[in-house]
Amino acid sequence: MRTIKLVLEYDGTAYAGWQIQPHDPTVQGVLKNAVELVMNHPIILNGASRTDAGVHAHCQVAAFQTSSERPIPDIMKGLNAMLPADIRICHAEEVHPGFHPRAEAIAKTYRYALFSGRKLPVFQHPYCTRIRGRINLEKMEKGAQYFLGTHDFSSFRSAHCSARTTIRKISESHFNKLQNDHLEYIISGNRFLHNMVRIIVGTLIWIGQGKMMAEDLPALFEKKDRRFAGPTAPAKGLFLENIRLKEDEKW
């Protein structure tokens, strides 16, 4: 059996997340169906990250096994011909047996797109969240620094999160100020809890609006209570930007 690794990007607007669900369209479900048609046999498709409904990806990693000897270029061409326009395979290769994207992933980077102006451009509406009212970016940046390091993120996960441990290590947390009132928040870590990035963004927006102080964050970690953190930011502004594997690959 050959193990084929896929690197893909997708617009998550039309999907109920990555993971297969019984009644709703998902990225994993659509991709699995395409792979089975191209390879002409049933497959098990594994992914590196379970993005939520409406979340996008510039770099998702998936893998499947096949007994087919079909060349990699033909597999990639066939998949992109079968997939809808909002999912695309960017890279494909054969990897070592036993490769599993989730086990191989050692770090993930997310980007959240924000707009602080009065009128968000129409064609950016599906991929960016507008912050209402004035914000203090300096305070938000100060707040972002408190997330660096290893913490218990119980206050920053959804009520539906079933993770066994809430300890996570964050290696990157900062804002970039872009042109025309656009901002982006970048966060990298070893793993993330359900809705963790979106709750962090909502909390940082609160800090920027003066509803919370950056200095309140250490106490919020100690509370381990979701009720004290900010709102969950909309899914549409969140992108899975990069996944670093044990081989230190970046796409």
Image (tube, rainbow, N blue to C red):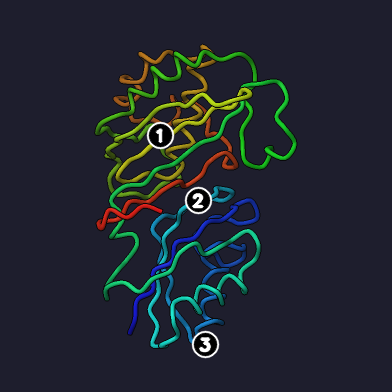
The three-letter amino acid code for the residue at tag 2 is His
The residue shown at (55%, 62%) is 27
Q: Earlier in the sequence, mark 2 or mark 1?
A: 2
Give the number of callouts: 3
Q: Nearer the viewer, mark 2 or mark 1?
A: 2
Q: Relative to the observer, which residue lies in front, 238 or 159?
A: 238
- At mark 3, the secondary structure is loop
Q: Nearer the viewer, mark 3 or mark 2?
A: 2
Q: Quadrant of the N terminus?
A: bottom left
Is 122 situated above or below 71? Answer: above
The three-letter amino acid code for the residue at tag 3 is Asn
Q: Position of residue 138 (x, y in %)?
A: 45, 14
Classed neighbour count for the residue bearing mark 1: other residues with Cα under 10 Å, few (<14), some (14–19), many (≥20): many
- At mark 1, the secondary structure is helix
The three-letter amino acid code for the residue at tag 1 is Phe
Q: Is residue 76 left or right of residue 49?
A: right
**Is label 2 in contact with label 1 (beta carbons under 8 Å)?**
no
Q: Nearer the viewer, mark 1 or mark 3?
A: 3
Q: Earlier in the sequence, mark 3 or mark 2?
A: 3
The residue shown at (61%, 33%) is 129
Look at mark 2 in the image and give the residue it sits on: 58
Look at mark 1 in the image and give the residue it sits on: 156
Q: Position of residue 104 (x, y in %)?
A: 28, 59
Asked where in the image residue 140 lies, by quadrant, the reply is: top left
Look at mark 3 in the image and give the residue it sits on: 40
The residue shown at (61%, 69%) is 83
Q: Position of residue 7 (x, y in %)?
A: 44, 61
Find the distance from the CA under tag 3 to the CA under tag 2.
28 Å
Q: Earlier in the sequence, mark 1 or mark 3?
A: 3
Q: Position of residue 188 (x, y in %)?
A: 36, 39
Is 177 situated above or below 87? Answer: above
Find the distance from the CA under tag 1 to the CA under tag 3.
43 Å
